[in-house]
Amino acid sequence: MKKYNEFTNQKLDENFELYTHIKFINKKPIANLYKGKIKLLGDKISIKIADNSTAQELAYFALGSGLATSNSRGFGFCNYVPM
C-alpha cells in the first residue's frame, strides 16, 4: 500500500479484502545470504487475489514493482499464474 500510494500520489482506503486464500509452499523458511554473511529468512507463498478492483489493481502493481524491500536482490519477486 505504501509503495502504491507513493508512486501514484493518492491515498487508498485500506479497508478492503486483498486476498481470499493464502498457502505456504515451503516447509521451513528459506535462507538467503545477504552481503555474504547475513542470512535473511523468507517464505514462498501462493495467494489468490480477491475479485474487487482495488485488490486487482494492487496485485497488478506488485507484479511490476515487487513486494516489500530488497526487490533488486529478488526478495520481493511476484509471479502470475492464471487460474
Image: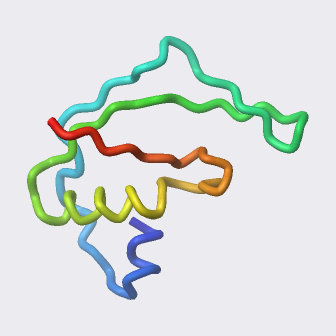
**Residue lying furthest right:** 37
Reply above or below: 13 against 9.
above
**Residue lying furthest bottom:** 9
Q: Is 58 in front, or is 72?
A: 72
Reply above or below: 58 against 42.
below
Q: Residue at x 39, y 87 (%)?
A: 9
Reply above or below: 39 against 54.
above
Task: Return the x and y of residue 62 as percentages of the image width and height.
Answer: 39, 58
- Classify residue 19 by image quadrant: top left
Task: Return the x and y of residue 67 as percentages of the image width and height.
Answer: 48, 53
Task: Return the x and y of residue 7 as percentages of the image width and height.
Answer: 44, 80
Asked if residue 79 lies left or right of residue 59, the reply is: right
Task: Return the x and y of residue 70 as percentages of the image width and height.
Answer: 65, 54
Q: Quadrant of the N terminus?
A: bottom left
**Residue lying furthest top:** 27
Q: Residue at x 29, y 56 (%)?
A: 59
Q: How is the image coloured?
A: rainbow
Q: Residue at x 47, y 69 (%)?
A: 3
Q: Quadrant of the C terminus?
A: top left
Asked if residue 28 lies left or right of residue 22, the reply is: right
